[in-house]
Image (spheres, rainbow, N blue to C red):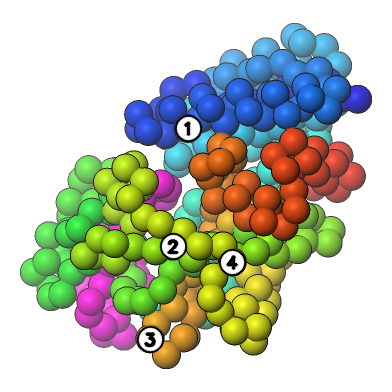
């Protein structure tokens, strides 16, 4: 049995996100204790390393922290953890950085043959639109999660709408705007579990009832989208998506777990949108535990599996 530090985000600028984090932390702590482990809760802060060292002997850290103040700091927390030289659950710093920078992840996906849409990063709002991009386009903050910054106005159909939205994102989120071709069609999320021998979990299809047909921050917060797991896909198409997901996961150097989002056009051509290198883990709610459950893992078993992977596969 291990003595663990469970690191988590104590504050969250998003109320829905804060509620999810609180329930997730309680569930992870309960699952670890159920398996006989000793758990010490550590809220993420600039004093986190000192607090962990004061505890004494820590065998492993369970990282459930999406940043100290915001999502953009998710990788910063991992950088702090790596300094301790203690095994931890979650992908290493390099994977976290590439995952949170969506344009970097897309370039890496493309380099290993994983299909992505054409995209462009706007840092000032004055850049000329790349002529390879075709409307409609979707505009989003480059470093956010949980659909923050995405509304019904995020899909644009002309230059006037485009630049208005770009400048709004840059101003409100104080970060670059990512512009990519919008794929109208089915959407799936794909979970990958493991490190040295990662495997793809049963996929979830997102079912939209809203007019926009994509996740907005309102739809995400109000849980208005439906789901089906596994989706109605041919064996051939399922195998294709799983192959792409594994390629993307390995190319970024992910460990333990991650979740990838993909959209498919009317011709069933898939386009990988992004990767979440620290997916939500709220039992009965978050996508990753749902997919793991479909693969035969109850929540306690899933948490234990992540712990074993972290201990057996030191990542730096």
Q: Which residue is mark 3?
A: 266
Query: What's the distance in space between the residues labelled 2 and 1, CA to CA?
Result: 19 Å
Disc 2 and disc 3 in contact, CB within 8 angstroms: no
**Per the image, is 99 magenta?**
no
Give whichever of discs 4 and 2 has the lower sequence position.
2
Q: Secondary structure at mark 1?
A: helix
Give me the residue at 63% from left, 55% from top: 291
Give whichever of discs 3 and 1 has the lower sequence position.
1
Give whichever of discs 2 and 3 has the lower sequence position.
2
Q: Main secondary structure of the magenta part?
A: loop
Crowd tier of the residue under label 4, counting other residues whose Cα lies within 10 Å: few below 14, some 14–19, many 20 or above: some
Crowd tier of the residue under label 3, counting other residues whose Cα lies within 10 Å: few below 14, some 14–19, many 20 or above: few
The residue stretch that appears in magenta:
119-147
Q: Which residue is mark 4?
A: 230
Let me know if residue 240 appears in the view: no
Residue furthest to the bottom: 267
* x, y percent for residue 251: 67, 67
Q: Which residue is mark 2?
A: 206
Crowd tier of the residue under label 1, counting other residues whose Cα lies within 10 Å: few below 14, some 14–19, many 20 or above: some
Q: Which residue is mark 1?
A: 20
């Amino acid at each position: 049995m291990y003595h663990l530090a469970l690191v988590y985000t104590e504050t969250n600028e998003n109320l829905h996100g804060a509620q999810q984090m609180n329930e997730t932390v309680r569930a992870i702590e309960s699952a670890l204790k159920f398996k006989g482990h000793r758990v010490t809760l550590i809220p993420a802060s600039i004093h986190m390393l000192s607090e962990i060292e004061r505890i004494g002997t820590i065998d492993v850290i369970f990282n459930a922290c999406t940043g100290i103040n915001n999502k953009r700091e998710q990788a910063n927390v991992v950088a702090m953890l790596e300094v301790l030289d203690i095994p931890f659950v979650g992908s290493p710093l390099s994977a976290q950085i590439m995952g949170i920078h969506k344009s970097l992840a897309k370039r890496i996906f493309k380099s290993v043959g994983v299909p992505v849409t054409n995209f462009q990063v706007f840092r000032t709002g004055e850049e000329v639109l790349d002529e390879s991009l075709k409307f409609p386009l979707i505009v989003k903050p480059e470093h956010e999660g949980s659909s923050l910054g995405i509304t019904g106005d995020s899909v644009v159909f002309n230059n006037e709408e485009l630049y208005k939205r770009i400048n709004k994102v840059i101003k409100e989120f104080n970060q670059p705007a990512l512009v990519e071709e919008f794929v109208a069609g089915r959407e799936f999320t794909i979970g990958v579990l493991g490190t040295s021998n990662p495997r793809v979990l049963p996929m979830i299809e997102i079912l939209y009832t809203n007019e926009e047909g994509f996740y907005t921050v309102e739809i995400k917060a109000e849980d208005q989208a439906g789901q089906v797991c596994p989706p109605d896909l041919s064996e051939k198409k399922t195998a294709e998506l799983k192959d792409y997901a594994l390629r993307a996961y390995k190319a970024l150097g992910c460990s333990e777990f991650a979740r990838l989002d993909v959209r498919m056009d009317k011709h069933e051509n898939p386009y990988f949108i992004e990767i979440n290198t620290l997916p939500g883990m709220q039992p009965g709610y978050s996508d990753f535990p749902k997919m793991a459950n479909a693969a035969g893992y109850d929540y306690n078993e899933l948490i234990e599996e992540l712990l074993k992977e972290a201990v057996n596969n030191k990542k730096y």
